[in-house]
């Protein structure tokens, strides 16, 4: 994953699912940039300000710490025994029974 590289101190994102998931998963601070989806061109100064917000100063340190905490929680949730792992397995089991019941009903 690109955001997992040690040189990445933060990211400016439009908050799409993939970038949000990757950012949380690796524990990287993110600055939302609503204007990335079109409209007026983004000014250099605005990008610089957004990046500094997630990379420099006390606020950036707090964001980085919180991002790392969220990343750790996300990884734990996906590990065996974690909430996401268990919920996904539960869904698969439910789908197995639904599929089986539908097939049996169809045959009867």
Image (cartoon, rainbow, N blue to C red):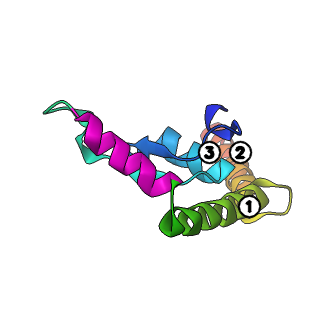
Q: Image height check: is 17 above or below 59?
A: above
Residue at which label 3 appears: 102
**Label 2 residue SS:** helix
| Residue 14 visible to an observer of this rendering | no
Q: Image height check: is 39 above or below 28?
A: above
Q: Nearer the viewer, residue 26 or 7?
A: 7
The answer to whether the residues at label 3 and label 2 have Cβ atoms under 8 Å apart is yes
Q: Position of residue 16 (x, y in %)?
A: 41, 42
Q: Nearer the viewer, residue 17 or 24?
A: 24
Residue at the image point whose x is 60% and y is 51% from the top: 28
**Label 3 residue SS:** helix
The residue segment tinted magenta is 42-55
Q: Which mark is residue 72?
A: 1
Q: Image height check: is 39 above or below 71?
A: above
Residue at the image point whose x is 42% and y is 56% from the top: 53
Q: Is residue 16 left or right of residue 65?
A: left
**Label 1 residue SS:** helix
The answer to whether the residues at label 2 and label 1 have Cβ atoms under 8 Å apart is no
Residue at which label 2 appears: 100
Q: Position of residue 45 (x, y in %)?
A: 27, 41
Residue at the image point whose x is 58% and y is 65% from the top: 61
Q: Position of residue 70 (x, y in %)?
A: 64, 63
Nearer the observer, disc 2 or disc 1? 1
Q: Nearer the viewer, residue 58 or 80?
A: 58
Q: Is residue 51 left or right of residue 27?
A: left
Marks 3/1: CA–CA distance: 40 Å
Dot 1: few (<14), some (14–19), or many (≥20) neighbours within 10 Å?
Answer: some
Q: Is residue 52 left or right of residue 68?
A: left
Marks 2/1: CA–CA distance: 37 Å
């Amino acid at each position: 994953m690109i955001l997992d590289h040690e040189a990445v101190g933060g990211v400016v994102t439009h908050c799409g699912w993939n970038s949000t998931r990757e950012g949380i998963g690796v524990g990287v601070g993110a600055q939302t940039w609503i204007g990335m989806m079109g409209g007026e061109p983004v000014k250099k100064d605005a990008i610089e300000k957004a990046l500094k917000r997630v990379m420099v100063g006390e606020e950036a340190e707090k964001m980085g710490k919180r991002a790392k905490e969220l990343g750790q929680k996300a990884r734990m949730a996906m590990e065996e025994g974690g909430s996401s792992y268990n919920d996904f397995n539960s869904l698969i089991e439910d789908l197995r029974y639904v599929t089986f019941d539908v097939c049996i009903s169809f045959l009867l």
